[in-house]
Image (tube, rainbow, N blue to C red):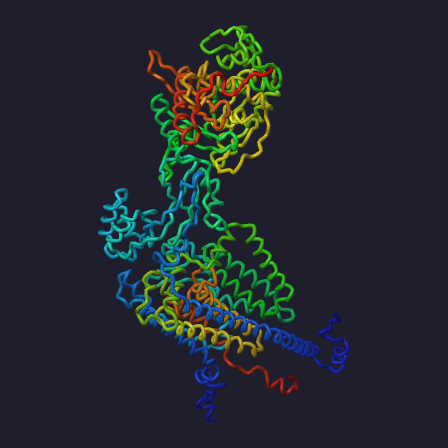
Amino acid sequence: MIRTPLRPLARILEARASGENPDAIERENLRIRHEQMRDASRGRAEGRLLILSVIFFCAFGVIGARMGVLAATEPAEPRAASKGSAILAQRADITDRHGRVLATNFETHSLYAQPLQMIDKERVAAELAAIFPDLNQDKLLKDFTGKRKFLWIKKKLSPEQKQAVHNIGDPGLLFGPREMRLYPNGKLAAHVMGGASFGREGVHAAEVIGVAGVEKYYDDLLRDPARQGAPLALSLDLTVQAAAERVLYGGMKLMNAKGAASVLMDVHTGEIISIVSLPDFDPNARPSPLVEGDASDSPLFNRAVQGVYELGSAYKIFTAAQAMDLNLVNNQTMIDTGKALRVGGFNIGEFQKKNYGVLSVEDIIIKSSNRGTGRMALQIGVKRQKEFMKAMGFMDYTPLEIVEAKGGKPLYPERWTDLSAVTISYGHGISNSPLHLAAGYAALANGGTYIKPTIIKRTGAPEGTRVMREDTARYARQMLRKVVTEGTASFGEVQGYAVGGKTGTADKPKPRGGYYDDKVIATFASLFPAHNPKYVLVVTLDEPTETSGKKPRRTAGWTAVPVAAEMIGRVAPLLGLRPEIEPGELAGITLTSN
Amino acid sequence: MTEMVYGSVPVRDGEPILPKWWRTVDKWSMSCILILFGIGLLLGLAASPPLAAKNGFEPFHYVQRQAFFGGLALTAMLITSMLSQIIVRRLAVVGFVAAFIALILLPFFGTDFGKGATRWYSLGFASVQPSEFLKPGFIVVAAWMMAASQDIGGPPGRLWSFILAVTIVLILAMQPDFGQAALILFGWGVMYFVAGAPMTLLLAIAGLVVVGGMVAYNNSEHFARRIDGFLSTDVDPTTQLGYASNAIREGGFFGVGVGEGEVKWSLPDAHTDFIIAVAAEEYGLILVLCIIAVYTSIIVRSLLRLMRERDPFIRLAGTGLACMFAVQAMINMGVAVRLLPAKGMTLPFVSYGGSSLIAGGIAVGMLLAFTRTRPQGEIGDLLRGRK
């Protein structure tokens, strides 16, 4: 812009010539300039002040309007009941495969106090302590008389307790409607259910969230309003589950085991019909996790899914199956198990230092020879063995739909050497859960396809991945049947159900390396009926000791097998299997060729 | 000769103070202040007995104190409003310096009354909060600086006032007293706006706030939850806010009746921050709307009168004082109706208060002094043939 000088030279010169003071001219100019500026700024300020006035007017208007709206609405009482009861059936039920309820909701009330409203605080504290023995009268009184304006007293009340509290008749005691998760069968399938607890809590309602098991895995699904409370059907069968739990509990006590697990799986659909882990707990009152010691000692620990153990000789059948599948051997190939087997600087020996001499592959399984499967493993080789184990699901956690499944991560050697291959061939050096083993046996039982186990009811058999030829699986089943009829699992015979299976007795590893002499994991993996298997049952006992003889016996044949046999005898009829008159020879299998 | 003997007859230039004051002061605004004070006493009768009972005083202890301090405050207001603008400015600057020193010395001599923030000096019978007195002083000083910066060859007053504002805000934020800090910042902003803040700057600030808010909402879970919690219609009925909005609902249009209200028993701040809830519960929407109307008329009248003002200093100082007064009232009521997030702020002249009431009286007195009608050079305009 062009600056207008405050002292225009022409006027100054003129003033000097006429003897005037030029400063007066400057002051005059300054004053005029100021006035112009002020006029300009006043115009602007006027506009902005008007804007401010309008803004304030509107703001106060909004506040007034809001006051009016508030005044026109109904007051929300900080009391119980009223709107909050719209929380019905927020969480879907869980049922077994036949629609029998495993988890449902129960309307109850929570109890809270507003000490400011309370009339006789001492009496209230005394009477509450009388109704709820776990409450402390002094502490209650302290809470009531302190600064607190609100406190929870009980999260859930039974109807009787509610009436008793009601009878105290104090206006400072208030009830909030609650929907609680109820497991009407108590401990039944506790590890699958997991449990639920309250999430965010308000006076009127509380969120019910799953904390473990399927409740947590399907938390979003169960709470999804779009499903409109449609129940979630599990693959479990309530009666079978109950029978399995009873038998396993009895077996655990009889065999002096500290824990036990069993898995019953449909071999064609992969559905888990029953899965038991003992000791168990009541999901209605879920115990708190252990703060010290081994987590696996807690009843919350799911041995069937989370517990990874070296399951021992039960794996031998996989080695034999793979060797047959690769045409390295057939079931009658003779292998010298008498010869010393030295791998990686270690001598591989037999159970109780026996020497079986030259055995056929079938007899290696029946007699459970470590050297026999070790030699087969060396023939198979590290790479192929590893691939096979991967295909059978032994290298990943099981895909079961409970949150604990991810905790059951298999342990296997990072460097898979020849020695690893040999030990893994008879089930040492690789740790899997009983569920892993059940899924592996299901692949043998259903004709050679691996099917992912599931806890959710399926309709029809899913497409599995083929892991071996059908005839390989058939020969393997034939061997398993012979283990029961002629071998280590003779107690496993159940009249009319043609049980086949393989025992496994593994020394328990010490926490600091090495193995215990007197602590074993005894496993019996079985399938029935052997000529056309429908179900696989794995029973595992933790540290069993059978004491009927002179010396304590710990092998699976004496511990896990009788328990499994009893269980099959009980659950097979429940599953709708008719006992068959035992065929004279191998059930339905005729050796026409080979 | 007579003059030589008796001295000259004393002649006042200009008219006497009182008649001139009565002629020029904004009588409507002043009446509104008196009405507010009256409402405050009335509500104090309802809201403060529970507190008095809790602290072991006779029921109307706090009402008596309110009347006493209110009397002092009204006196201060009247005296201040009678002063001429130049005297007001000088006294305000002196007061500002004193309050500023008192504010700085707070960490050494102040008490926190167990509330976690050192904001007060305890004088035994009453407590003084320097920031209350600092606010009107700051407005005047900042307005003076800004006005001076508009002259040719004047000092860079806007920058100075900004630095001063930031300093005070930092000191207040350290106490911590974010409410007062925000008020100071707001007062400065309004004056800067009226003094001619460039439009581009205003738009840039508005844009920054919007973008920053959105970024914060999307990225910070904590911030988002605060905002969601504020926006959600549910409010835990056992919080102060819940009690307040319930009280307003209970009151409805005509109130539950004098002395019948319940909320004053539940809210510890019923006589200060949530006095409007007590008003709404006992006297209903009618009284609340009256209060809002009174505040609105004070602020709108003051701003409209300041529009005609030609002196930049008076215009700015008046704007700052009026807006600060209005915003304080707005925040208080906005919180009670959940239009604004919870922030403790008293309702000027209605809420119970000791020295803060006097400070408020002085501030309003200044506002009244600045909004008095005076010749605005209209004659000069006429003579020069402008306008």
Placement of A336 over or under B260, stated as above or below:
above
In the rendered image of this protein, does residue A95 appear above or below residue A412? below
Q: Is residue B84 left or right of residue A463?
A: left
Quarter the C terminus of chain B occupies: bottom right
Report x, y in % for residue B14.
Answer: 50, 85
Q: Position of residue B134 (x, y in %)?
A: 47, 64
User: Where is A19 relative to A153, above or below?
Assistant: below
From this viewpoint, is residue B90 visible? no
Is A9 on the left or on the right of B222, as rendered?
A: right
Residue projecting furthest to the bottom:
B1
Q: Which of these two is toward me, A215 or B259? A: A215
Nearer to the camera, A54 or A45? A54
Residue nearest the observer in this picture, A560 or B348: A560
For the image, the number of numbered tags is: 0
- Residue at 44% of width from left, 10% of height from top? A352
Q: Residue at x 58, y 26 (%)?
A: A390
Quarter of the image holding residue A461? top right
- Residue at left 55%, top 7%? A336
Q: Position of residue B298 (x, y in %)?
A: 47, 75
Q: From this viewpoint, is residue A124 visible?
A: yes
x%, y% of residue B286? 40, 74
Instruction: Identify which residue, A262 or B266, lies in the foreground.
Output: A262
Residue ID at (57%, 28%): A449
